[in-house]
Image: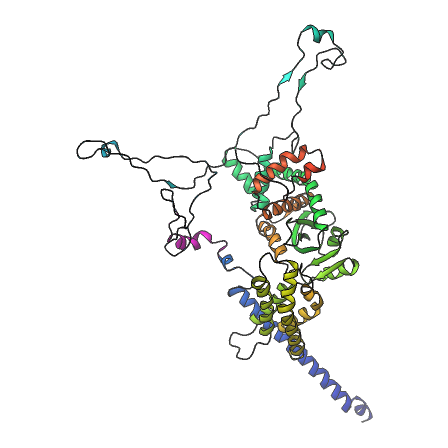
Amino acid sequence: MQQAAQTTPSYKDLIEENLFLARQLKELKADKDHLEDLVRLLKRQRFAPKSEVQNAAQGTLFNEAEALTAEDSLDDDSVDTGKSDPKPKQGNRGKPVRSSLPADLPRVDRIVDLPESEKICPAGLPLKRMGEEVSEQLGVKPAEPFVLRTIRPKYAPCECPACQAHRDGPAYDTAGKRAVKIMPLPAQPIPKSFASPSLLAMIATAKYGDGLPLYRQEELFKRIGIDLSRQTIAGWMVRCGDIVKPLINLAKDELISGPVILCDETRVQVLKRPGKKPTAKSYMWCFKSDSDRAKHVILFELGPGRGHEVPMNFLQDYSGYLHTDGFEAYETLAAKMPSIILVGDWAHVRRKFDEAIKAFPQDFKGEIKVKTGFDLINELFRIDREVIPYGATDDERHRIRQEISKPIIERLKAWADNIRPSVRPKSLSGIALKYMIERWNKLVLFLDQPILRLDTNPVENAIRPFVMGRKAWLFSATVAGAEASAALYSLISMARAHGHRINEYLEAVFTDLPAAKSIDEVEALLPWNWEPSPAA
């Protein structure tokens, strides 16, 4: 009996056990609700339209021909130049139709005339020509390779008495033999290679501008009778990455001197990285100047990981605002570099609220509390997009944000503080609220700093061509190849941002940069300084 009494739990133990079980049950229920939210969200992302995170046209990205043929066939896009109409033509559905093809394209005339027998009137007299109708279509020829021959005439001293009398002059070498005079070979992008600047520009544009892998370009060259292996092409691209480094270094100096930098990162696989397995992830970091500057600087930097070390090394001389998403590596970076002030991204906050809304059951009849926060954030974007005039000065932007945006921010903060205690922390709504409140001081910096944006969308747009190209070429074989890709993606992205034709710009760079002798000649090739040659 005494042993039984010792093993019987006390009333206090039972209460503590019940409380423990109740807490555990509450946590399990929270986990269950969180997982149900995730399942509903994933179903929505998998099967429903993704209007918040994806452009509506992106659904037909890989189905363009089939999806657009029926619609486009209803409109006549032919060009009739027989009449001049100051207003743009309208298709059958009211859509504008191209009025003319570029005037600088060469024209090839094709005469479609009546047979001679139909140029005679019933009385037997020739018809009088009264004019013509001209219709234009865009034609194209396949790539036409050619061999660029560089011919350098050679000259020797003549047999005149003057030359014979000065055998110790510049016309003769130390052995008294006549010296041959010839112009040196122009500087080549890749010495002792048959790759011309135009060929290198075409290959680089195709891969880094259009996402066409080198093995596909190898097949394209075979179709036009050129046997050019992808190993050779890959070696050329690595050399091209080295060629453009002076431009990348100058662009980095310009980026560091600015007041705001936007940053984002994405994964990349490098098969032969020393000390790492081929399946290990590396990361490509993208740094972009603020969008309102006349000089659009976009730089890619290869990193071995996703830690703070990569941006810290890249930004070691930078002092200013760093606009990023909420990734924790940036918090570590800011803690180690007091010269950097982190700026929050309202687009990521809005995305969290959007995910929380989509996680609710479709037949949910109650009030979706986080909808209020989502609408208020959208209002902030609407003000910056519609109320603040295009080209507004910093003072104008600051005044409008203080008068209109600041009250919305105050409403949003009061709403979040009031609603948070009633929202389950592990729910997507709770996660969205926590994400916003923890970054609040960084998110509201735009109110007092008119040079700041609400989001990091420009750098995400800049990194998107790299992500889309990665879907085609999948990985980089070596670190040197990945670093060359970073340099060429940087240069092409900046050329695109300044409105240049990428192929034309790269050909100029590969032609003039190897011959540059001064810093001024290099600076002239930066995308914001370079101007295309006028058409002949």
Locate residue 100: give its quadrant.
top left
> Is residue 524 something one can see in this rendering?
yes
Identify which residue is drawn at 53% across, 59% down.
Answer: 55
The image quarter containing residue 10 is bottom right
Q: Nearer the viewer, residue 65 or 286?
A: 286
Name the one closer to the observer, 110 or 119. Answer: 119
Q: Position of residue 123 (x, y in %)?
A: 17, 33
64 in magenta: yes
Residue 171: x, y in percent? 71, 14
When the figure is inspected, residue 363 is found, relative to residue 466, above or below; the finding is below
Q: Position of residue 276 (x, y in %)?
A: 72, 50
Q: Is residue 350 above or below residue 17?
A: above
Q: Residue furthest right?
A: 2
Magenta extent: 60-77
Q: Is residue 186 above or below residue 365?
A: above
User: What is the x, y in percent for residue 315?
Assistant: 74, 52
